């Protein structure tokens, strides 16, 4: 079994204020709150074998904060975590990783994709009901064998306000 943590990027600059939305960074407040959330996760004893992040600037900055806080020593980008990414591409990656690597994985990405992915993993269908707030987290236990789609269990749904100082 693998504990999967879906983490939405922190508060970022306003949509439409950057020529290339992919380059939109965390705001100062987003950086500060993401650092607070990461510190709280560390105090709670969380540790990730790997952090995978969307290649977009705001997600990458969030992942870098998680890594710098000591939640993982490894961080990599995965294109499937960009907006409108394909969960099947991630599942192909995951099946290879889970057979040889650790058992705790963090994915840093975007809404509505993270909420939709959580629903697919838990219920096997998108219901558009789970919302991951900025710097919020969903924890899901993935099965040891077989497809994780519709066969995973929710164990944690935390908005950032419960993790801030």
Image (cartoon, rainbow, N blue to C red):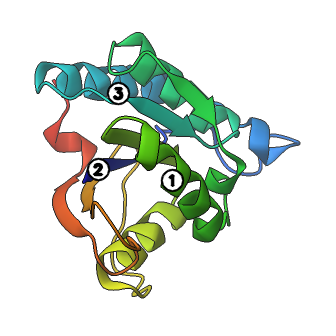
Q: Secondary structure at mark 3?
A: helix
Image coords of residue 56 (percent x, y): 70, 40
Image quarter in which the C terminus is found: top left
**Residue position for label 3:** 33
Residue at 14 percent across and 41 percent down: it is 162
| Residue situated in front as seen by the camera: 96 or 152 | 96
Residue under label 2, please give it: 2
**SS state under label 2:** strand
Estimate the spatial distance between the alpha carbons at disc 1 and disc 2, rounded to whole Å: 10 Å
Name the mark nearer the viewer: 1 or 3: 1
Q: Is residue 153 visible?
A: yes
For marks 3 and 2 on the same chain, the one whose residue lies earlier in the sequence: 2
Q: Report the residue at 68% width, 33% height from top.
A: 57
Residue 40, placed above or below residue 155: above
Category of crowding for the residue at label 1, using alpha-carbon neighbours closer than 10 angstroms: few (below 14), some (14–19), many (at least 20) = some
Q: Are marks 1 and 2 in contact (CB under 8 Å)?
A: yes
Nearer to us of marks 3 and 2 is: 2
Q: Earlier in the sequence, mark 1 or mark 2?
A: 2
Secondary structure type for disc 1:
helix
Q: Residue at x 65, y 31 (%)?
A: 25
Query: Residue at label 1?
Result: 94
Residue 97 in percent (x, y) is at 50, 44
Please state, as top left, top right, bottom left or bottom right, where the N terminus lies in the image: bottom left
């Amino acid at each position: 079994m693998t504990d999967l943590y879906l983490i939405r990027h922190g508060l970022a600059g306003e949509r439409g204020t950057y020529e290339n939305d992919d380059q939109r960074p965390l705001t100062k407040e987003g950086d500060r709150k993401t650092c607070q959330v990461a510190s709280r996760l560390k105090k709670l004893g969380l540790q990730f074998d790997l952090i995978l992040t969307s290649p977009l600037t705001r997600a990458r900055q969030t992942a870098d904060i998680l890594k710098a806080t000591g939640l993982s020593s490894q961080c990599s980008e995965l294109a499937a975590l960009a907006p409108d990414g394909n969960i099947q591409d991630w599942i192909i990656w995951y099946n290879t990783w889970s057979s040889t690597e650790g058992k705790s994985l963090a994915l840093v990405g975007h809404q509505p994709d993270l909420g939709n992915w959580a629903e697919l993993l838990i219920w096997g269908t998108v219901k558009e009901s789970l919302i991951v707030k900025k710097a919020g987290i969903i924890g899901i236990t993935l099965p040891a064998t077989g497809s994780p789609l519709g066969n995973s269990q929710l164990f944690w749904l935390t908005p950032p306000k419960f993790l801030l100082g």
